[in-house]
Image (cartoon, helix red, strand yellow):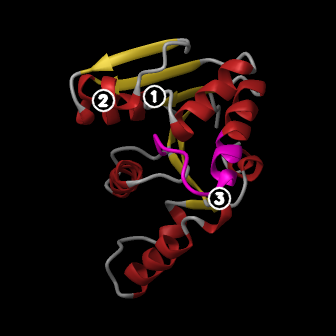
Amino acid sequence: MQLNSIAVFCGSKSGANSLYEQHAYALGKIMAERKIVLVYGGGNKGLMGAIANAAMDNGGEVIGVIPKLLLAWEHQHEGITDLRVVEDMHVRKKMIYELCDAAIVLPGGNGTLDELFEMLTWNTLNIHNKKIVLLNSGGFYDHMVEHIKTMSEQGFLYNDWKERLIVCDDPESAIASLV
C-alpha cells in the first residue's frame, strides 16, 4: 500500500506523562522524514501541537482540519502547511478520514476516543478499510485494549478486533506496521 498521508488523532492537552509528548514529536519527525503528510485536528496545543510542530520543524507537510467551534479552544495552528476551517465536528472527522490513507491514535481524551471508535466502526461496516494503529505510549491504552478483548470474548464484536486495530508501543513500530 502506498502511504501518502496519515491521520493522527490525539489530545489537545499534553497529559501527565512526558512520554506522550515525546512520542508525538518523534512520530511527526518520522512522518516528515518519510514524506508522509500529517492530517490532524488543526490545534497548536498539547500533543496536537507537538506532532504538527515536529512535522513542520523537519520539513514535512501538515494539513489541519478544525471546526469553527474549536478555533478559540484549541488555538488553531497558524504555522502549518494548510489549515481548513469547517462547520462542525462531523465534517471535521469525515474530511480527516477522506484525506488519509491510514490513522494512528495517540493518547487523548473523549474526542480522541470518539475518533478512534468511529473509525473502527466505519472499518467494521466497510465504509473504509484503512489501517488503524493505536500508539500505546507508556501503556496509556492498556485498560482499553483489555476492555476491547472483553467485548470480543463476550460476543459483542463482529470480527477479530486484531484485524481492525494494530497496537504498538512506540512511534517507529507504529509507522512500520503501516508500510
**Of 29 and 152, the residue lying toward us:** 29
Q: Is mark 3 on a helix, strand or loop?
A: helix
Q: Distance between the residues labelled 3 and 2?
A: 26 Å
Q: Name the outermost residue toward the bottom.
A: 154
**Of 172 and 71, the residue lying toward us:** 71
Give the residue at mark 1.
Answer: 43
x, y percent for residue 61: 62, 17
Q: How far apart are marks 1 and 3 (CA)?
A: 21 Å
Q: How far apart are marks 2 and 1 (CA)?
A: 9 Å
At a point 33% along the width and 36% down the height, the residue shown is: 93
Can you tell which mark lies on residue 137? 3
Can you tell which mark lies on residue 70? 2
Q: In this view, does 12 lie above or below 86?
A: below
Range covered by the magenta-colored residues = 11-24
At a point 67% along the width and 51% down the height, the residue shown is: 18
The crowding category of the residue bearing disc 3, from other C-alpha atoms within 10 Å (few below 14, some 14 to 19, many at least 20), is many
> Amino acid type of disc 1?
Gly
